[in-house]
Image: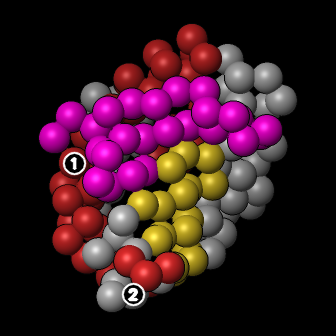
Amino acid sequence: MFTLEQLKESHSKVKSGADFPSYFKEIKELGVTHYEAYVSDGRIDYHGADHYIVKAPAKYTPLTIADVVAIDHFKLELLAHQLGKTDFLTFITMCATTGIEKWEICMDKKTCAYFDKLGKVVLVERIPF
């Protein structure tokens, strides 16, 4: 199965949303079935077959997540990030200020679901590859 070191190496190549397709492919090939990325502190839980899990620790000082989701603003900024117009830290900060608590990537379904503080799904996107 995959290791934290392998996952860190893959993630280090992501500079903007434009880099996501190659990252997705690389970690799927490592055996990741899905993962949850937490906006508040950057920790990530990577899941594999047979309940295998690797937890990447917090990466930065905790951010405050807004109580109310500003979905229209979030969608605009998400698109800008996906086009490579913002770096990852800018994206994370935007997620916090627009009320996004975490996202979950499902490798088999090729989806990314964004959640609010209450655990409610606020947006699901198909990953187009």
Could you tell me which quadrant the N terminus lies in? bottom left
> Which residue sits at x=63%, y=54%?
38
Residue designated by label 1: 21
**Rendered location of residue 33, percent (x, y):** 36, 65
Could you tell me which quadrant the C terminus lies in? top left
Q: Amino acid at mark 2?
A: Thr
Q: Amino acid at mark 1?
A: Pro
4, 127: nearer the viewer:
127
- The residues bearing labels 1 and 2 have C-alpha atoms spaced at a distance of 20 Å
Residue 53, above or below 24: below
Tell which residue pokes out farthest to the front in this image.
Answer: 50
- Determine if the magenta segment contains residue 1: no
**Rendered location of residue 35, percent (x, y):** 47, 61
Residue designated by label 2: 3
Magenta highlight range: 105-129
Q: Is residue 108 visible?
A: yes
Tag 2: Cα neighbours inside 10 Å, few (<14), some, or many (≥20)?
few
Q: Is residue 12 visible?
A: no
Give the mark count: 2
> Which residue sits at x=62%, y=75%?
57
